[in-house]
Image (tube, helix red, strand yellow):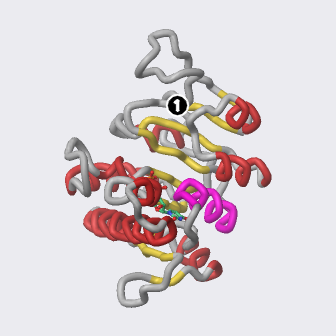
Amino acid sequence: APNETTYNRVMLKISGEALMGDQGFGLHPPTVQRIAREVKSVHDMGVEICMVIGGGNIFRGLQGSAQGMERTTADYMGMLATVMNALGMQSALEAEGVFTRVISAIRMDEVCEPYIRRRAVRHLEKKRVCIFAAGTGNPYFTTDTAATLRANEMACEAIFMGKNGVDGVYDKDPKEHDDATRYDQVSYDDVLTKRLKVMDASAIALARENNLPIIVFGLDEPGGFKGILAGRGTYTKVQ
Ligand code: UDP
């Protein structure tokens, strides 16, 4: 059937920039709502959903430290930015009637739940979308690593990397080269050795160690996320 999927539990990773629309900064509520509808359509298929959202639309630790900030402080600011994005997504999902929990790697009990693995698993079993915030809770990491770590801990079957302006992994930057070609499938080792832009190297290594497939797809196409889960559309599978 066209609307069925073989997946039971997945991780969706999106960058912070995915939430900013054409604004160039911050959260654009209609864009957040559009992504929330994409998530709802997959939730409606009965799939258990974990999410990690980056923070680059608000603050990036590396950029802060490049401008003279102490690196770990800048990274904590980046992690706090992801909590704001997670709350924005929670609000949008709940407006669509999807129950959610924001689960933070850094405690802030008045705002969201702390990360307790067994509790998060229980939320998933009860079909609540779990939005994992504050990255790994550690400086010097990225939200790609956080997504891979939580996907492993939650026993997700795959990580779906939703990208803007691109529908998979190419051999060279498709925005700069007309003859760039998309991989249907590529190995973790090729991603690392050819430095293909999927995730940072530590996240790729963590996925490889645990045989966690990474599916890179375009987030721009309405219905795209659901289509990919049902086996339609274009994407690149890293495994
Ligand atoms: N960050 C961190 N540890 C983590 C995850 C994130 O220190 O485990 C910080 C880091 O400074 C990063 C920022 O949070 O630059 C925002 O995350 P990221 O750059 O991964 O966001 P994205 O590019 O996906 O929007």
Q: Residues within 10 Å of mark 1 (few under 14, many from 20)?
A: many
Find residue 61 and report its horizontal and vertical position in percent: 45, 60
Residue 124 sits above or below residue 107 on the image = above
Residue 84 sits above or below residue 55 on the image = below
Classify residue 75 as left or right of residue 157: left
Q: Residue at x 25, y 66 (%)?
A: 95
Q: Residue furthest right?
A: 209
Find residue 27 and report its horizontal and vertical position in percent: 25, 57
- Tell me if residue 145 is in the magenta stretch: yes
- Residue 124 visible in the displayed image: yes
Q: Residue furthest front?
A: 68
Classify residue 45 as left or right of residue 20: right
Mark 1 residue type = Gly
Question: Which of these two is toward me, 34 or 178?
Answer: 178
Residue 72 sits above or below residue 5 on the image = below
Q: Secondary structure at mark 1?
A: loop
The residue tagged 1 is 168
Find residue 183 and report its horizontal and vertical position in percent: 61, 24
Q: Residue furthest bottom?
A: 110
Q: Main secondary structure of the magenta part?
A: helix
Find residue 2 and report its horizontal and vertical position in percent: 50, 36
Question: Which of these two is toward me, 16 or 227?
Answer: 16
| Mark 1 Cβ inside 8 Å of ligand 1 | no
Q: Residue at x 41, y 65 (%)?
A: 69
* Magenta region, residue range: 141-155
Q: Residue at x 35, y 47 (%)?
A: 18
- Tell me if residue 73 is in the magenta stretch: no
In which quadrant is the C terminus drawn?
top right
Question: Which of these two is toward me, 201 or 165?
Answer: 201
